[in-house]
Amino acid sequence: MARTARSTDDAARDPAIAEAVIDGVLGSLGSTADPCILWVGPARGELWTRARKLGHAYLREAFADRGMHPDGSLIPRGQPGALIDTPARAAAQARSLARSGEVDTLCVHSDTPGALDIARAVRAALQDAGLLASGAP
C-alpha cells in the first residue's frame, strides 16, 4: 500500500484513522492473521500501536531526505526545512537516525532533486559508520 506523508502522519496521531488504514489493508488481503504481513510506518504512534496489538511485524521508518518535527512527523512539503536536497545533509541525518535506535529502515524519495546522489551518500555514510544491516546490498 502506498501512502502519503499526510495520511501516515494522520494515522500515527489518530487511533480511528490507524484502525481504518489497517483494517482496510487487512480486509483487502482477506486475512488478519497472516504472519507474513509487515507494516512500515512512523516510528511511534497509533499505527505502530495497532499493528503491534495485532501481533504483526512493524518496521519503524524515517526519511534521510525530509525534515521532521520533534514528534517524528514530516514537515509538509512547501514549508521551510521540508526537503533535504544535499547529499551531505541527508547522509548526516541518516547516520543520526540510524544511531538513534528509534528507526529500522530509512527512505530516500525518488522525486527529491539529486535523489540518486543522496542515496549513494546515505549508503556510504551508513557503511562507513558500520550501520548497514547485515546482508544489505
Image (cartoon, rainbow, N blue to C red):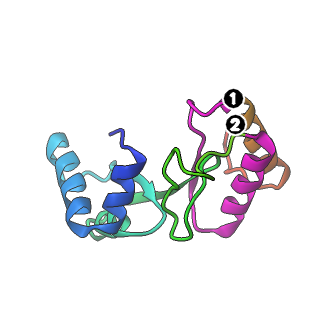
Q: Is residue 74 above or below residue 45?
A: above
Q: Nearer the viewer, residue 85 or 102?
A: 85
How many C-alpha atoms fall within 10 Å of the one at disc 1: few (<14), some, or many (≥20)? some
How many C-alpha atoms fall within 10 Å of the one at disc 2: few (<14), some, or many (≥20)? many
The dot on residue 116 is 1
**In the image, residue 110 lies in the stretch drawn in magenta:** yes
Quadrant of res 48? bottom left
- The magenta stretch is 86-115
Quadrant of res 13? bottom left
Callout 1, which amino acid?
Leu
Q: Residue at x 48, y 51 (%)?
A: 76
Which residue is at the far right?
128
x, y percent for residue 80? 61, 52
x, y percent for residue 68? 57, 59
Q: Residue at x 18, y 56 (%)?
A: 20
Q: Is residue 39 above or below residue 29?
A: below
Q: Where the C terminus falls, by quadrant?
A: top right
Q: Where the N terminus falls, by quadrant?
A: top left
The dot on residue 44 is none
Q: Residue at x 51, y 56 (%)?
A: 74
Quadrant of res 41? bottom left
Q: Is residue 100 visible?
A: yes
Would residue 89 appear left or right of 66 to someone viewing this image? right
Q: According to the image, label 2 marks what residue?
A: 119
Q: CA distance from mark 1 to mark 2?
A: 5 Å
x, y percent for residue 75? 52, 55
Which secondary structure, mark 1?
A: helix
Which secondary structure, mark 2?
A: helix
**In the image, residue 99 lies in the stretch drawn in magenta:** yes
Callout 2, which amino acid?
Ala
Would residue 24 appear left or right of 47 to someone viewing this image? left
Report if the CB atoms under discs 1 and 2 are less than 8 Å apart. yes
